[in-house]
Image (spheres, rainbow, N blue to C red):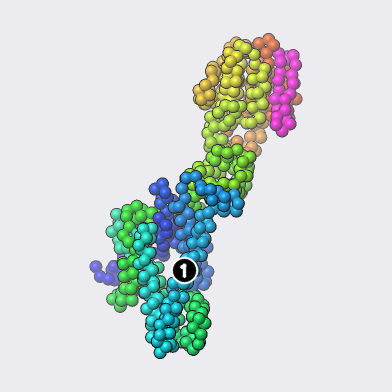
Amino acid sequence: MTKREKKKNTICSSVGGQAVIEGVMMMGKSSYCTAVRDPEGEIQVERVRYKQGGRATKIPFVRGVVNMFVSLVRGTKALMRSAKMCTESDEEPSRIEKWVAEKYKLDLMQIASLLSMIVGLALAVVLFIWLPNFLVGAIKGLAPVLNGTVWEYLLLGVFKLAIFIGYLALVLLMKDMKRLYAYHGAEHKTINCYEKGLPLTVENVMGCSRIHDRCGTSFLFIVLIINVLIVGVVNWACGVHLIASRPLQILAKLGIEIVLLPVIAGVSYEILKLLARFHGKISAVFKSPGVLLQKALTTREPDEQMVEVAIAAFNAAMEMDADPDMKESSFVTGGILSEMLKSTKQKFGKAGIDASDAEWIYSLVLGIKRSDLGKERIIKPKETRRINEIVDERLTGRPLWYIIGDVDFYDCKIKVDERALIPRPETEILAEHAVKIIEEGDKVLDMCTGSGCIAVAIAKHCADKKVQVTAADVSDAAIMLARENAALNGAEITFVQSDLFSRIHGRFNLIVCNPPYIKSADIDGLQREVKDYEPRVALDGGEDGLDFYRRLAKEVTRYIAKGGMLMLEVGEDQAEEVLKLFEKRDYAMMVKDFSGVDRFLKIAF
């Protein structure tokens, strides 16, 4: 195969990347995606979209400056995010971490990352700008003849190159940097595999080269050479060598180098782009220093697990480019309680979900009271994962308590799912009044039992009174759920599948009933989590919402013992109308709910 044929079979990829802590960041046309292997060994991917560059990214020399700045910002963010991802653990935060969180509402890791970035920038200025000029100045003190000559600037270049290579070699002694360089190799291998047109499998990627023409190492080497040339010319032209004071001369050189950074970056970028277009012997000579640096220092052979991470990052970037509607995603990390709770409430607000649901989620996952959510604390990654799972499912519209799987009801743990309505807090008032009037040996019927919450509460709280509890519902699925709740709470209950009294026998001292009471026409106007998830059969009370109360009024006298009582839950503004249906009664009274609404009826026969 000729070189021209090889070139035709090579895909020109727009994806570039960089190694991060225990992972790889890949930058596509519309997003950058970072894949990291977390402390538990799972690959997590963070996807971030960005706006396409404007005209500045297409203007020669200017585009190099823009791309350098953008890449620096995005690369630093990805690096800091990966560091946060890999340094967090599910261990209890230290006392200083708790203090910083409570006092300043900050994560100690965020502070450490920011300080590291500042120190890193300062170190770069000292090592690659100040130190070379200082060393040259010291030598000129011994040999003044060098001042202002080409040898001064060649010497400056030699020092810069030596410090650059020495720095890369020195950090390689660190175990973590060896892994970083190995991930750098995985990034190159993955891009090379794609550009060869091969499927991105671990086997194919491992067989590719870890050297790449567009590597940042090559760019840095070119920057170094261009820096020496441009800075030397400008320093000579400005007559910096004529400044008598050595400290002032060094300061002037520092200022010139910093000011010229955009120019150097722009020229270097164009040279790198030009070299990447050619694959002949002449271009290979110019590429060779960067290639040698990659081979000797800045890349290492990755293992298969590292390659898996690089492939995940590359595929994520390609998927984001291919699908403009694909949503962003974030690493699952810990954080400050107040900030995370605020963010969740904002998400729920946009989705029309009550903020109290967010508070319940954090309260349940963290194992604290809702009233204690105001006390600042650090949320662990494991807790964050569980919170995110619940939040994401809640945003689909599914009711919170179906997601949680159970609710507390009058000192009982009640399992809940789509087979029955979720027990409402106010219904506890009905259970409480029932428990108070039950006497030794009473027979109790819980009609329309649903999840069985009322029957279970009565059976559990009146177990010492030898009460016989029967629970009935028209729904087989609801009866199954109620049986599970009885077993869960150790409650002895007889269950009957019955359409109201159709399969009920005998008389009862107390009949408790919370029947469907929503008007048929009103159901479609209910909250999404109610109308779309809770069983319609447990909601629909007919045209005026009173169908079941009429049937109860008509039949209840045949099933209630003399001196017995019927206790009902009714809808808002229904109490008076329901009472009128029960003409054959000795007396009746209304009981209000937590909001002061007449919600319950106690009817004696």
Q: Compared to 249, does 409 lie above or below?
A: above
Quadrant containing the N terminus is bottom left
Inspect this view and state whether residue 279 appears.
yes
Dot 1 surroundings within 10 Å: few (below 14), some, or many (20 or more)? few
Query: What kind of residue is marked 1?
Result: Leu
Circle 1 SS class = helix
Front residue (pair 224, 65): 224
456 relative position to 205: left or right: right
Which residue is at a point 42% across and 57% down the rendered structure image?
21
Which residue is at a point 48% across and 54% down the rendered structure image?
84
Residue 296 place in picture, x, y as percent: 31, 67
Q: Which residue is mark 1?
A: 123
Residue 189 place in picture, x, y as percent: 33, 61
Q: Which residues are magenta?
A: 584-605
- Residue 598 in the magenta stretch? The answer is yes
Q: Would you identify the image quadrant in which residue 445 lies? A: top right
Which residue is at a point 35% across and 67% down the rendered structure image?
169
Count the labels in the image.
1
Q: Would you identify the image quadrant in which residue 4 lies? A: bottom left
Which residue is at a point 44% across and 72% down the rendered structure image?
127
Residue 538 place in picture, x, y as percent: 60, 28
Q: Compared to 340, does 296 lie above or below?
A: below
Looking at the image, which residue sits at the far front?
Answer: 142
